Image (spheres, helix red, strand yellow):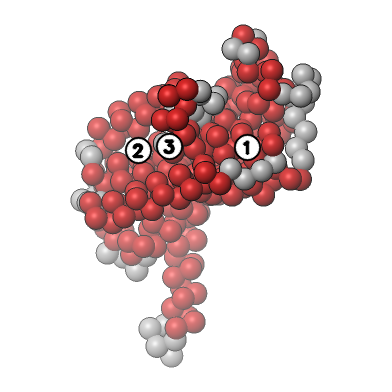
Amino acid sequence: MSPAANPAAATGARIRRVLAQARFEALATLRHGEQLLLSILLPVIILIGLSTTGLLDARGLLDRMGDPAEAPVALVLPGVLAVCVVSTAFTGQAIATGFDRRYGVLRHLATTPLGRSGLVQGKLLAVLAVLVVQTLVMGLVAAALGWRPSLPMLLPGALMLLLGTAAFLALGLLVAGTLRAEATLAGANLLWVLFLAGGGLLVEHTGAWGAVTAALPPGALGQGMRAALLEGRLDLAAALVLVLWAAAAYLATVRWFRWS
């Protein structure tokens, strides 16, 4: 019986194709020097730098922590994990997909049995695989700096990471599928810097700007990660913001994404 006549065999073949694409993209990310710098080395530098210097104390951010010995790394880690999501799901995928589109790779892959949906699913699984590696690395570095995780923070933290990945991957594909590759490269890197500098990823903002960032994906992700890892709770408002942005970006990508 041919795979086309056997739904189970066809489904199995499709899953194998998606997993193969995900494995290829994940290994390509981890083996690529610039991607490795963006996804692993820079977050580690941020984590160590902010945890071992007086920058947080100078801004009065340590006052909200109960344990002064654990405060620096515990306060920094949620934002650094949010940075990992943006680096991999948004910046890395936007740039890689943008240049794949420019050189015709996407157009050819879309005509293979993998198909367009399989390609997107493979990218999502690849991002999640790289994010697992990033989380393990950041967790080990944070543990070496004195961070002690607790069970209540794990589930809300994992959920926020998943929602952030969905939102930023959809946004990354939207950028890559609508702009030229050179514009995607410049824009994705610029947005990464802006998200870190004032987007609410690393630290929470107050006042009017805080309200603005809370309604945007980087601010919602940073806020949600801090609620999970500092308070052990799921921030429903931040989660809803990420869900809405993910849905809007997905619909926009379906409508305007160009494969060539």
In the figure, is residue 125 to the left or right of 120? right
Name which of mark 3 and mark 1 comes first in the sequence: 3
Q: Which is nearer the eye, 218 or 21?
A: 218
x and y, in percent, of residue 179 in the image:
23, 40
Could you tell me which residue is drawn at 41 percent across and 36 percent down?
216
x and y, in percent, of residue 142 in the image:
70, 29
Where residue 110 sits, quadrant-wise, is bottom left
Could you tell me which residue is drawn at 64 percent across and 40 percent down?
228
Q: Residue furthest bottom?
A: 1
Could you tell me which residue is drawn at 50 percent across and 24 percent down?
205
For the N terminus, which image quadrant? bottom left
Marks 2, 3: nearer the viewer: 3
Q: Is residue 163 above or below residue 15?
A: above
Q: Is residue 191 above or below residue 128?
A: above
Amino acid type, residue under disc 2 in the picture: Ile
Q: Residue furthest front?
A: 207
Residue contact at pointers 3 and 1, CB within 8 angstroms? no
How many C-alpha atoms fall within 10 Å of the one at disc 3: few (<14), some, or many (≥20)? some
Q: Is residue 83 above or below residue 208?
A: below
How many C-alpha atoms fall within 10 Å of the one at disc 1: few (<14), some, or many (≥20)? many
Amino acid type, residue under disc 1 in the picture: Ala
According to the picture, the residue beneath numbered tag 1 turns out to be: 227
x and y, in percent, of residue 24 in the image:
46, 52
Where residue 61 sits, quadrant-wise, is top right
Element on which disc 2 rests: helix
According to the picture, the residue beneath numbered tag 2 turns out to be: 95
Q: CA distance from mark 1 to mark 2?
A: 30 Å
According to the picture, the residue beneath numbered tag 3 turns out to be: 215
